[in-house]
Image (cartoon, rainbow, N blue to C red):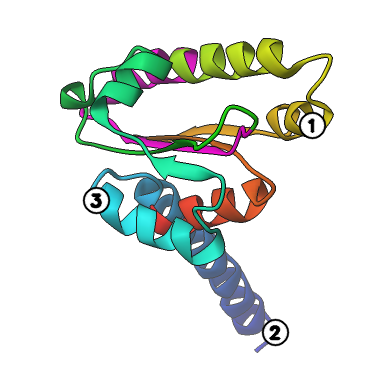
Amino acid sequence: MKKQKIDLLNLLRYAVVVALIAYIAILLSQEGSGDVPVKTIREKIMEVTKEDGMTKGTTQDLKKYYGLNASDYDGVMLYIPNDVMSVNEILVVKLKDKSQAETVEKAAEKRLSTQKSSFEGYGVEQTKLINSAVLDSRGYYVMLTISEDADAIYAAFKKGI
């Protein structure tokens, strides 16, 4: 009787471990899988922030500020500052191929550096926002946000993908 209890406990332990491994594998495989359109991510982001201080960017703005061509990607969401003293900005790029992530990340880092050098020394609030910017790459998506709502935008981005 005692041996049967031990075997049952061991079996349950193994079952729990296997279920946990399967759960983790499912979570990892779904992160940034590339099947969510940028429009859906935009909707999630706009639930937690407003367009205050920003204007919806065009493909020309993407080229001007980031040196990227919108047609090279599966989708782009860009909001840029609407005046010269604003730094609020959101960029979400859906990649066609994961190998494009490095190019987009470098362009975003360059944009952050440019903004930082533009405001450093006199734009204290702007510099603070730039320093707390969030840049992340997940699967087929790259996101950059400079905003007071950066953490909430980032959480919405992760939830959206």
Badge 3 vs badge 2, beta-carbon distance below 8 Å: no
CA gap between label 3 and label 1 equals 31 Å
Q: Is residue 1 magenta?
A: no
Residue at (62%, 18%) from the top-left corner?
115
Q: Position of residue 32 (x, y in %)?
A: 37, 44
Q: Is 74 placed left or right of 152 in the picture?
A: left
**Which label belongs to residue 128?**
1
- Asked if one can make out residue 22 in the rendered structure from this viewpoint, the answer is no
Residue 83 location, x and y as percent?
A: 55, 33
Task: Answer few, some or many: residues within 10 Å of disc 3's Cα (few below 14, many 20 plus, some between 14 and 19).
Answer: some
Quarter holding residue 44: bottom left
Residue type at mark 1 is Lys
Q: Is residue 149 left or right of residue 92?
A: right
- What numbered label is drawn on residue 95? none
In primary-sequence order, the first of circles 2 and 1 is: 2
- Indicate which disc, 3 or 2, sits on the residue closer to the N terminus: 2
The residue singled out by tag 2 in the image is 2
- Amino acid beneath label 2: Lys
Residue 34 can be seen, yes or no: yes
Measured as percent of width and height from the top left, residue 29 is found at 36, 47
In this figure, which residue is indicated by the disc labeled 3? 37
Which quadrant of the figure has residue 160?
bottom left
Amino acid type for the residue under numbered disc 3: Pro
Task: Give the magenta part as a residue range.
Answer: 86-106
Q: Which of the marked residues, 3 or 1, is nearer the chain's N terminus?
A: 3
Q: Residue at x 22, y 26 (%)?
A: 70
Mark 2: give few (<14), some (14-19) or many (20+) Cα within 10 Å.
few
Where does the N terminus fall, quadrant-wise? bottom right
Distance between mark 3 and mark 2 Cα atoms = 56 Å
Q: Is residue 12 above or below residue 131?
A: below
Residue at image coords 59%, 11%: 114
102 drawn magenta:
yes
